[in-house]
Image (tube, rainbow, N blue to C red):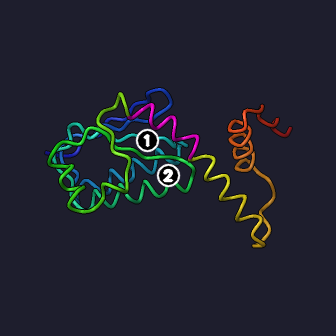
Amino acid sequence: MALEQQASEDQGVTVVALSGQLDSRAAPDFEKALLKLIAEKKHEILLDLTALEYVASAGLRVFVMVGKRLQAEGGRLALCALNEGVMKVFEISGFVPLFPILPNRREAIPWLLANARAGRISSLAGEILRRDGGGPRPPAPGAADREKSSYAAELLGKPAPPKPK
C-alpha cells in the first residue's frame, strides 16, 4: 500500500498522520513534505503512526534528518501510536532513544507543547554562546534576530520588543 500523509494543526502542533508503507519509493516525497512544513516555520511536529504498516531504513533516515533539522531550529519532533511491527523496527535499529515516542496523540500534543519552550531556550542559549565564543561577528540584525528576540522575550515572560519601522 502506498504511503498517504494527512497534515493538520492541533493546538499549535502540526500533526502528520501516516498510513501505508514508508519505503524507499515514498521516503523522498515524505521528506519534501516535512521540509516544506519546517520552511513554513512549523517547529512542533507530531508524526501519528497509527496506520503506518511498514517503515524501511529510508524512512528512518527521514525521521532522523527532520528531527535534527527541527532541533537545530529550536523545534521538536515526536512520534506517537506506533504499531507493534513499526515499534519492532525502531527497537532493532536502535532508534527508540532518538525520538520521543508517546502512546497516542492525546498525550503527545501536550508533551510537545511543554517541551517546545525548552527547545527554544536551548537553541537561543546555543546561539548566544556561539556569538560570545570569539568567532566571526554576527551579521547585521534582521528578521531572524527579531524572531529570536521575540522568543527570548516570550521565554522570559516579557513583552516582545517592537518591530523596527
User: Going 19% across and 49% down the picture, which residue do you hit?
Assistant: 86
* Percent x, y of residue 41: 55, 43
User: Quadrant of the image for the N terminus?
Assistant: top left
Q: Main secondary structure of the magenta part?
A: helix
**Disc 2 to disc 1, C-alpha distance:** 9 Å
Is residue 137 part of the magenta span, yes or no? no
Q: Are marks 2 and 1 in contact (CB under 8 Å)?
A: yes
Q: Which residues are magenta?
A: 108-118
User: Quadrant of the image for the C terminus?
Assistant: top right
Position of 154 relative to 38 (above/below): above
Position of 83 relative to 28 (above/below): above
Determine which residue is flagged by label 1.
45
* Percent x, y of residue 24: 23, 60
Between 114 and 144, the one nearer to me in the picture: 114
Going by the numbered disc 2, the residue's amino acid type is Leu
* Percent x, y of residue 7: 37, 35
Can you name the residue that lies furthest to the bottom here?
135
User: Going 70% across and 65% down the picture, which residue do you hit?
Assistant: 130
Determine which residue is flagged by label 2.
70
Secondary structure type for disc 2: helix
Going by the numbered disc 1, the residue's amino acid type is Ile
User: Going 73% across and 47% down the picture, which residue do you hit?
Assistant: 143
Secondary structure type for disc 1: strand
Between 161 and 116, the one nearer to me in the picture: 116
User: Going 44% across and 36% down the picture, which residue do you hit?
Assistant: 111
Can you name the residue that lies furthest to the right here?
165
Characterize the local packing of mark 2: few (<14), some (14-19) or many (20 or more) Cα atoms within 10 angstroms: many
Q: Quadrant of residue 95?
A: bottom left
The disc, 2 or 1, on the residue closer to the chain's N-terminal end is: 1
Characterize the local packing of mark 1: few (<14), some (14-19) or many (20 or more) Cα atoms within 10 angstroms: many
